[in-house]
Amino acid sequence: GVLQYIFLKLPFELYAGYNLGWSVSLLNIIVHKSITSVLFDAVLAYVSLSALLGVGCYMMWKEKKGLCYGVGVGLAWYLFGVFFELVHPSSTVVYTTYSDVDIAAIKYMSVTFAGILVSIVALWAIKHVIKGGKRRLDEEHDEQEEDDDDVGKFVLHGIASVESGGRRIIDEAGDGVDHVSMVIDDALDEAEEGVERVFDAMGV
């Protein structure tokens, strides 16, 4: 469920996303110490930011079982940190490594990519809510159909019971009529025999 994801899975995804960005940053530092080229450092920074955006989009947008928002949010968290660090640099290394144009480009790429990742998270969250609401409506509809089926079955059973009871009453009434008819016939036969005996006694 959602609560299980928030408390058990989301913290690890946030940690993984942020540390992925931090690992790429450390890789840039190592390469910078090995290759002292301003152009190469700038290109590597652009490629690194684009790669982080691609990884974040892939992790969140790819269809998979369960939720997976934390990696993208962790990367967006790191990219926002890059943006604010370049707005107010705490080290002069930034100015000695990159030109003002590169700093501005990296700064706005970071905040733009972070915004894209947050937007994807928001879209996925909205999609999840809509899908969950639709699923609940479908379940309620199915339950209503089951209830309607139960009511229909109950009504049909009642009609069948009434029909069966009516037939039984008619059959019993028919049997009663037959019995009464037999009794009447027997009474008439006995009366006829009595009349004949009277006539015989009278010598008629």
Image (cartoon, grey):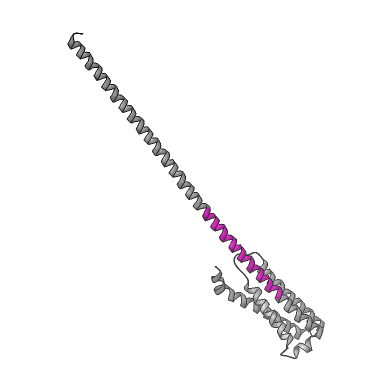
Task: Look at the image and tell me whether residue 177 can be seen.
Answer: yes
**Depth check, front residue: 100 or 163:** 163
Q: Does 42 appear above or below 130?
A: below
Span of residues in magenta: 115-144
Does the magenta portion include 13?
Answer: no
Residue 58 coordinates in the image, percent (x, y) = 68, 69
Judged left or right of residue 203, residue 56 is right
Q: Extreme top residue here? A: 204
Q: Does 183 appear above or below 92?
A: above
Residue 180 coordinates in the image, percent (x, y) = 30, 27
**Quadrant showing the N terminus:** bottom right
Q: Does 202 appear above or below 178?
A: above
Judged left or right of residue 170, residue 98 is right
Q: Quadrant location of residue 23?
A: bottom right
**Depth check, front residue: 151 or 40:** 151
Judged left or right of residue 1, residue 117 is right
**Depth check, front residue: 73 or 186:** 186
Residue 41 coordinates in the image, percent (x, y) = 78, 82
Q: Quadrant location of residue 69?
A: bottom right
Q: Quadrant location of residue 71?
A: bottom right
Task: Look at the image and tell me whether residue 37 can be seen.
Answer: no
**Quadrant showing the C terminus:** top left
What residue sits 65% from the left and 68% below the top? 124
Residue 86 coordinates in the image, percent (x, y) = 74, 85
What residue sits 66% from the left and 68% below the top? 123
What residue sits 21% from the left and 12% below the top? 199
Q: Main secondary structure of the magenta part?
A: helix
